[in-house]
Image (spheres, grey):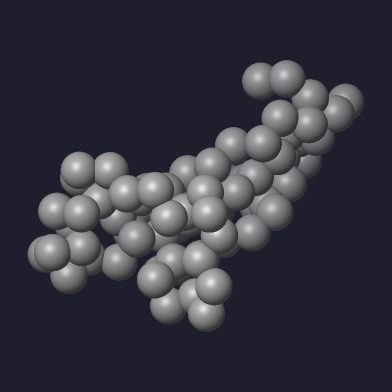
Amino acid sequence: MKPNATLHLKTDDQTLYEFTLEVLKNRTDYKILEHFNDIYKLTEIPAILQLKTHYEMKHLEDGRLIKYIQFQSIKK
């Protein structure tokens, strides 16, 4: 990953969400910029999160929460 690159992870999987947060918190080469356990509880949903995949729409129909993590590699 290039230095200062930003990654976006959007998932319905609680285990993946929690695991990724835990890994990132313990790394010095990545910085968590923001994270949300349920993006649809936000007052304003950022444009990048408004895009819905086919699977996201299916998960929402099933009542699953959509989580999001934005993180960045730190230049070394």
Does residue 38 lie above or below 76 as drawn?
below
At horizontal 39% and vertical 48% (from top left) the residue drawn is 51
Where residue 12 appears, as percent x and y from the top left, is 30, 55
Compared across the picture, whether 10 is left or right of 60 comes to right
Q: Quadrant of the N terminus?
A: top right
Residue 19 appears in the figure: no
Does residue 26 lie above or below 38 as drawn?
above
Residue 76 appears in the figure: yes
Q: Quadrant of the C terminus?
A: top right
Q: Nearer the viewer, residue 73 or 25?
A: 73
Does residue 34 lie above or below 27 as drawn?
below
At horizontal 70% and vertical 54% (from top left) the residue drawn is 33
Compared across the picture, whether 32 is left or right of 38 comes to right
At horizontal 47% and vertical 54% (from top left) the residue drawn is 49
Where residue 45 appears, as percent x and y from the top left, is 51, 66
Q: Nearer the viewer, residue 52 or 75?
A: 52
